[in-house]
Image (cartoon, rainbow, N blue to C red):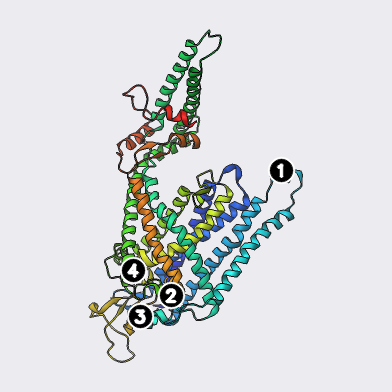
Amino acid sequence: MASAGLLQTSLIWVAYGVAVALVLLVAIITTFTWQQPHERSATVSVVAIISLTALLATVLLLPVDIALVSSTTSATLGSKKDWATPERVDSILLTLKIVYYTLYNFDALLCLIVIPFAYFWYEEYDEVDEEEGESSFGSRFWGATKYTLVFVALVIILFLVGFFVPAAASGHGKHMDLDYFKRLIAANKGEKALTFALGLLMTLGTLLYTLYTGAGLALLPISFIKSAPSISAPQLSATTASALERNRDAQRQLEMRNAGRPDGMPQKDRREMDALLREERTLVRRERLAAEARGEGQSAIFRAWTKTQAVFRPLKLLGGLLLLLVAVLVWVSMLITGIDKAANSVCKQHCGYILGHINVFQPVNWIFVQSAKAFPVDYVLMLFLVLFLFSSSITGIATVGIRFLWVRIFQIKKGRTAPQALLIATVMLALIILAINYAVAMLAAPQYSIYGTQTFCSNPPISPGARPNCTNHLDFVRPCSEASTDPLAKDVCTPTVMSTFLNRVTLNWPVFGAIDFWAQFAFLGVFLIVFTTSLFRTPRLNLSELDEEAEADEEEGLLASTGRRFGATWQDITGRAKQATTTGQGDYGTAGNGSSSRD
């Protein structure tokens, strides 16, 4: 039996190792996809790849945590498995703690020292001084180190504050007499300082999470849905060619009408000619973009890849609708848990609104508990949920940009992201990860994230010291919960390392718990506003962004008809444009007066 337990835990860690190897590949692709090609820096690229890999590895550790503690218990009988001796369980928890602390310390080292150093190292580079020999490695290194020391001083101050500021007292009412809550009070100064530092960083991350993840959770599904354009490359090429011909005819008519004038064109005709010339430049550029989108002048492999993307556009649309359904389900579940915590928390604001057990039906938590019956479906779903929230954070940062209040400092876009913006976005994601762990463990799936599939047998043992037996009394099997007063649960229920850490933060520092809890309602509000706005936005093609970024990027409302999307996909596959049925101004082919005024 011991070998069976070793095999199960080993497989979980092997799966985690494979996932980390895959996210390394994802980090490399992401870094080179988002960076500006002409401003790439080897130092920035390496730091960004390592940082993104470490962040994703930290995110993926939560499903591993849940899987390992759940593997020690038989969910059917409510008892520890034969191999799960106290020593073995302690060994598993110790390994998890070591990995957690290693990753969090590494993330902190990256975000507070390595990334700032890489940022200032890049800023200290001057191409002119480098060519003239006025900039040396030593001066550049000292300049970056000088500014980085400021961040090191902030870290030291942070730990000193946590070391000396008193934590919460060990009693806040009758509910605090439970053994589970007593164990959460930090006993030594070093652990208390670390709890304070990470709690403060988690609170800062929650503020970023509220804005960026809240907006990204609504925008990520929409980005999949609008990925299929309303107009195909062949159709865009045809309508642009027609509009360009009309534009040049209008120019010829103006020139002929003013031919022979000794004083040249009148002011009115000159303004009209200037507008036509600006529109002509826009249409010529758009015609070239349409040709590139069709693969003209490219290899056969590139054209085949373009048609393959067009074939899979309907699947992206369906995938976007599925993600939208998941986002709404997560939103509803978090709202239910938030209301439940606010009304039924065992100690309210004194412990960050810790909830002893769920009092209202919560769909996401129920799905995880039920899917646990078919191993390993629940772990795959948890992995999907965590990555979905992480991807939503990236989408939110890319859409909103890096801002100070309402002023945009950096913009995050594919192929257009400055190295400084990439490093700052990485730091933001590191803070947001702490908030994502809190949201998943405390609101999205609270019962499952804390105890996984663990249950305990409440059937009293036959003799003192004997193990409870529910083999013939399955109705005595109860799910584990924080507020359980049954002494039999103490020997069976093992909380996850992540939930223990989060509850320790909110219990020792209630102000952090209160801020993190009420910020979740702000997160839900941001999602609702962005989702509603995107849902009812009128369909339009953003031609200025098309011309500026060399790609057609339509801002499509979700209530608009999707018929022309599939039509555009079919035209991209066949390479033929639909025959025009109207003349004059095309819907999307001409720049019109709007484009003329924008240029």
Kind of residue at badge 1 = Val
Q: Nearer the viewer, residue 521 or 363?
A: 521
Q: Give me the disc on residue 507.
A: 2
Label 2 vs label 3: CA separation?
A: 12 Å
Mark with earlier residue (2, 3): 3
Choose mark 1 or mark 2, whichever is in front. Answer: 2
Residue that label 3 marks: 175
Answer left or right for 319 relative to 204.
Answer: left
Callout 2: helix, strand or loop?
A: helix
Label 4 vs label 1: CA separation?
A: 60 Å
Kind of residue at badge 3 = His
Mark with earlier residue (4, 1): 1
Choose mark 2 or mark 4, whichever is in front. Answer: 4
Residues packed near mark 1 inside 10 Å, few (<14), some (14 to 19) or many (20 plus): few
Callout 3: helix, strand or loop?
A: helix
Where's residue 198, x and y in %? 51, 68
Q: Give me the disc on residue 128.
A: 1
Mark with earlier residue (2, 4): 4
Q: Is residue 283 above or below residue 154?
A: above
Where's residue 235, x and y in %? 38, 29
Mark with earlier residue (4, 3): 3
Q: Nearer the viewer, residue 308 or 495?
A: 495
Label 4 vs label 3: CA separation?
A: 16 Å
Where's residue 130, x and y in %? 72, 46
- Residue at 68% across, 49% down: 125
Assign the N terminus to one quadrant of the image: bottom left
Q: Nearer the viewer, residue 288 or 342?
A: 342
Kind of residue at badge 2 = Leu
